[in-house]
Image (spheres, grey):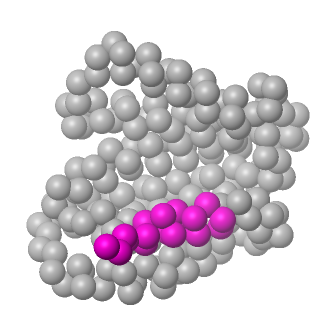
């Protein structure tokens, strides 16, 4: 019996690209953030198109669903990425900066918006595990718990952009979940580009 290895292969490719992200972005920081985001989304659109082509024409969406897709695309795909890239530029792409610290708040925004918009209930155990996960993510990101706050005069502005990006991505996770009962996960990812 043949096993389907497509998922693990894509995870491997994504992890490899993510590993080189820091190296690639440092050479791009002379470009305006919106230019980087445009090409990032163009490549995503080109790469994903063959995988979702058949789903696009098979899926029937309501007007409300289309507005939700547009909202998610603009909030996470445009603003979230723009704010994160701008924040990194403000701290000169220093990887142990306040930008990455504030990104650890993304799950908090996802949990909060899920509670508000999806009416999800969380028991005490869930909250304890969520807090532990955020603390663990902090120590995985910052060796010895050290955050470099001396990243220049743009640190405060970078922090605000990073906070905005964390909100955009975290809350978009909740809004995407609203669509998953209606459209395929691949198509949902595609529409973010």
Q: At 36% across and 21% down in the image, what residue appears?
A: 126
Q: Which residue is at the front of the view, 101 or 127?
A: 127
**Prevailing SS of the magenta stretch:** helix
Please identify the quarter of the rendering in which residue 58 is found.
Answer: bottom left
Q: Is residue 140 left or right of residue 152?
A: left
Pick the quarter of the image with the C terminus: bottom left
Residue 154 located within the stretch drawn in magenta: no
Q: Range of the magenta residues? A: 1-17
For the question of whether residue 25 can be seen, the reply is no
Residue 7 located within the stretch drawn in magenta: yes
Please identify the quarter of the rendering in which residue 110 is found.
Answer: top left
Q: Is residue 183 left or right of residue 80?
A: left
For the question of whether residue 49 can be seen, the reply is yes
Q: How many marks?
A: 0
Query: x and y percent of residue 169 in the render?
Result: 47, 48
Q: At 50% across and 21% down in the image, what residue appears?
A: 131
Query: x and y percent of residue 42 in the render?
Result: 53, 80
Name the outermost residue toward the front. 1
Q: Is residue 57 above or below residue 184?
A: below
Q: Is residue 34 left or right of residue 141?
A: left
Query: x and y percent of residue 82 in the render?
Result: 59, 59
Query: x and y percent of residue 161 in the render?
Result: 62, 45
């Amino acid at each position: 019996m043949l096993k389907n290895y497509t998922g693990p292969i894509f995870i491997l490719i994504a992890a490899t690209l993510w590993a080189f992200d820091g190296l690639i972005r440092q050479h791009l920081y002379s470009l305006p953030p919106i230019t980087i985001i445009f090409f990032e989304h163009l490549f995503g659109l080109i790469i994903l198109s063959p995988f979702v082509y058949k789903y696009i024409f098979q899926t029937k969406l309501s007007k409300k669903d289309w507005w939700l897709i547009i909202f998610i695309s603009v909030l996470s795909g445009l603003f979230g990425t723009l704010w994160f890239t701008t924040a990194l530029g403000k701290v000169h792409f220093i990887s142990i900066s306040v930008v990455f610290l504030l990104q650890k708040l993304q799950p908090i925004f996802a949990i909060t918006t899920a509670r508000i918009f999806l009416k999800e209930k969380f028991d005490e155990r869930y909250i304890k595990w969520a807090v532990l996960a955020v603390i663990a993510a902090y120590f995985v990101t910052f060796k010895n718990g050290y955050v470099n706050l001396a990243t220049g005069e743009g640190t405060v502005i970078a922090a605000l952009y990073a906070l905005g990006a964390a909100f955009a991505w975290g809350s978009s996770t909740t809004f995407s979940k609203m669509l998953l009962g209606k459209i395929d996960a691949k198509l949902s990812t595609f529409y973010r580009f």
